[in-house]
Amino acid sequence: MAAGAYPMSYLATAGASAAPITRLGWGLLTISIVVVLMVGALLAGALWRRRAGVSPDPEGRLPVERRGPGLRWVWVGVGISTLALFVSTVWTLTTLAAVRHPPRPPALTIQVTGHDWWWEARYLGDAPGRDFTTANELHIPVGQPVRLELRSADVIHSFWIPKLGGKTDLIPGRTNMAWIEADRPGDYRGQCGEFCGLEHARMALQVVADPPAAFQAWRDRQLAAPAPAASPPIAAGAAVFQARCGACHAIRGTPAGGLFGPDLSHLALRRTLAAGTLTNDPQGLTAWLADPQAIKPGNEMPRVPLTDGDRAALVAYLQSLS
Ligand code: HEC
Ligand SMILES: [Cu+2]
């Protein structure tokens, strides 16, 4: 099954955190199909079998008879069901135990916080001072387990990357642990797995698995300060941003330090906007800034009144944040 055609399919998965669950899923499906076929065949056989001629007594009642192999079928059936259920239970419990902890020490830890309706991701540093925050797109190194600390800023959300493992809830006031591992480079789409309000359906998450060297380069890039404004529109956009957007959004290396909305440092490296809602290109940015409420109704970014010139300058500035 092509990963591109079915990005959310959990029937073919790609990593050690998902493999035991996928095997279990196919196994239980196979057992269920065999059981349905057996029950169907027995039922059909029973319907087609000719009944031995039993004659009712004078009052029309059929005699109760425990002759023949009838009762044995019941015992055999109970035996097979017990065995199938026992195998399923043991297999489920061993799978749960197998995916509880990563097989090797995790390469890094990401603190993921669910917000109505986007994902905040804080990468804990590989050295002091190397922490950073990003949003809606996680990069991970291929072939290495990554530890996730899952929290919520508001209501219950659920972290779910179908190709990389099962769901883990993000619950207000607690930290849940999970881990993911991708064994092939590529994009893995995720989605909030627990209804969390109006825009729950537009709360997607992208995981990009890079070869380790590319991941390291991405991480170093995230830590770099933004390039100085290369043209007058970019400089104008930066000024508008500080004045109109910096209270909600942070851009590392600038005075903008708002924590209410997604961190926009290196926004231009991200593929989508507003948790998978729009493509991150000049058209998408312009449409988002023109009216975020028309695109994702009810989301927590208000429509900020801007002149066309200011909006174009903001788009140029945001596009320069690579
Ligand atoms: C009141 C706080 C607030 C203000 C002011 C605000 N935003 Fe936002 N912004 C948000 C929130 C919250 C989101 C997340 C919306 C969602 O996806 O549900 C967001 C999302 C975004 C995104 C998409 C980010 C991503 O990771 O996909 C961009 C780009 C953006 N805002 C730019 C701006 C710009 C430019 C301004 C100034 C004109 C601005 N915002 C003003 C709160 C704000
Ligand atoms: Cu949700």
Image (cartoon, rainbow, N blue to C red):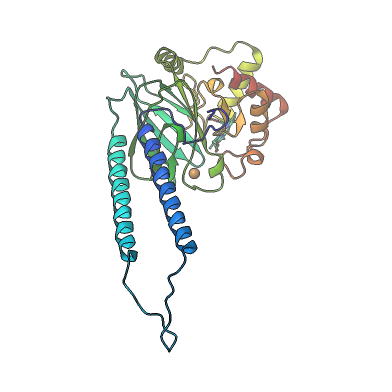
Q: Position of residue 157 (x, y in %)?
A: 44, 43
Instruction: Name the residue located 58 percent from the left edge and 13 percent from the top edge.
Output: 229
Observer-nearest residue: 176 or 321?
Answer: 176
Q: Quadrant of ligand 1?
A: top right
Q: Is residue 177 visible?
A: yes
With respect to residue 234, does 245 lie above or below? below
Q: Is residue 228 above or below residue 280?
A: above
Q: Residue furthest front?
A: 53
Q: Is residue 63 left or right of residue 257?
A: left
For image coordinates 32% across by 63% down, the residue present is 69
| Relative image position of residue 2 (x, y in whole percent) | 54, 28
Residue located at (31% from left, 72% from top): 66
Which residue is pictured at 33% across the width and 40% down the height? 175
Q: Nearer the viewer, residue 80 or 281?
A: 80
Q: How many marks?
A: 0
In terms of image quadrants, where is residue 304?
A: top right
Taking depth in this image into account, of 312 and 17 the one nearest to the observer is 17
Q: Is residue 228 above or below residue 209?
A: above
Q: Is residue 161 visible?
A: no
41 w.r.t. 116: above or below:
below
Q: Position of residue 291 (x, y in %)?
A: 66, 36
Horizontal side, residue 197 vs residue 143: left or right: right
Percent x, y of residue 320: 58, 17
Outermost residue, right side? 308
For the C terminus, the image quarter is top right
